[in-house]
Image (spheres, rainbow, N blue to C red):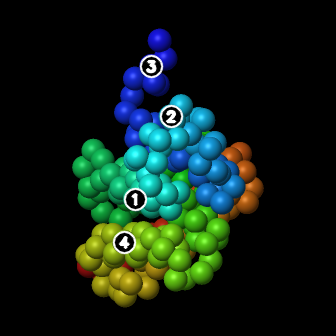
Amino acid sequence: MNLQKQSDPRERILEAADRLFYTEGVRATGTEKIMSVSEVAKATFYRHFPSKDDLVTAYLEYRDRSFFEYLDSPAPPEDIHEALARIERVVNRADIIGCPFLRIASEYPDFAHPFHRIAVEHENKFLAYLMNLLKPFAFDKRAVAAALLSVVDGGLTTRFRFSRQARGYSRAFSACEFNAAK
């Protein structure tokens, strides 16, 4: 018996969408392909996700939640160094090919588009997360957090441009030093 068929159909749909949207793009991935990969009927698919837009929104919410759960597991980082080390580890995983939020923003460049706005919200949440870890330092937290976010985005963009074999391009995280007075 197929173990995948025993799992929750909504979860199978989300897992398939996550994999396909991330690797092939949202616009290039049709609902029929997602239904086929997740092994659900059309009625089941639309019962859980009335539209593809609803599925894309759920995918982005899942990616956001997963990212911050990863950063805070098993416990929140004690400082910016630990956070950057965790980010570096995830960015350099073999299955990482770029930032799903940057990819969405590039597929939907209109700032007013709901998917683009979700991507911006994620970046703003990440910026606030980094700023919070920079509280002990006596410098402009927003400016430094924005610079760190640019390094992270740059590392992920490099991974996207130069393939999965380009691990190490994002090693800049570990080069960041914070010796400012507390």
Judging by the rendered image, the residue that carries numbered circle 2 is 40
C-alpha span from label 3 to label 1? 26 Å
Q: Is residue 8 visible?
A: yes
Query: SS at mark 1?
Result: helix
At label 3, the amino acid type is Leu
Q: Vertically, is 9 above or below 156?
A: above
**Dot 4 amino acid type:** Lys
Which residue lies at the image location 60% right of the left edge and 81% below the top edge?
110
Q: Is residue 63 something one can see in this rendering? A: no
Front position in the image: 121 or 67: 121
Q: CA distance from mark 4 to mark 3?
A: 37 Å
Q: Nearer the viewer, residue 41 or 80?
A: 41
Check residue 61 in the rendering and tell me which mark sits there, or answer none: 1
Are the residues at dot 4 and dot 3 in contact (C-beta closer than 8 Å)?
no
The Cα–Cα distance between marks 3 and 2, rounded to whole angstroms, is: 14 Å
Residue labelled with disc 4: 125
Q: Is residue 169 left or right of residue 93?
A: right
Q: Which mark is residue 3?
A: 3
Separation of residues labelled 4 and 2 (CA atoms): 34 Å
How busy is the neighbourhood of tag 4: few (under 14 within 10 Å), some, or many (20 plus)? some
Badge 2 crowding class, 10 Å Cα cut-off, few under 14, some 14 to 19, many 20 or more, is some
Q: Which mark is residue 76?
A: none
Looking at marks 4 and 3 on the same chain, the residue that comes earlier in the sequence is marked by: 3
How far across and how far down the image is residue 121, in percent? 41, 74
Callout 1 environment at 10 Å: few (<14), some (14 to 19), or many (20+)? some
**Foreground: disc 4 or disc 1:** 1
Looking at the picture, which amino acid does disc 2 mark? Val
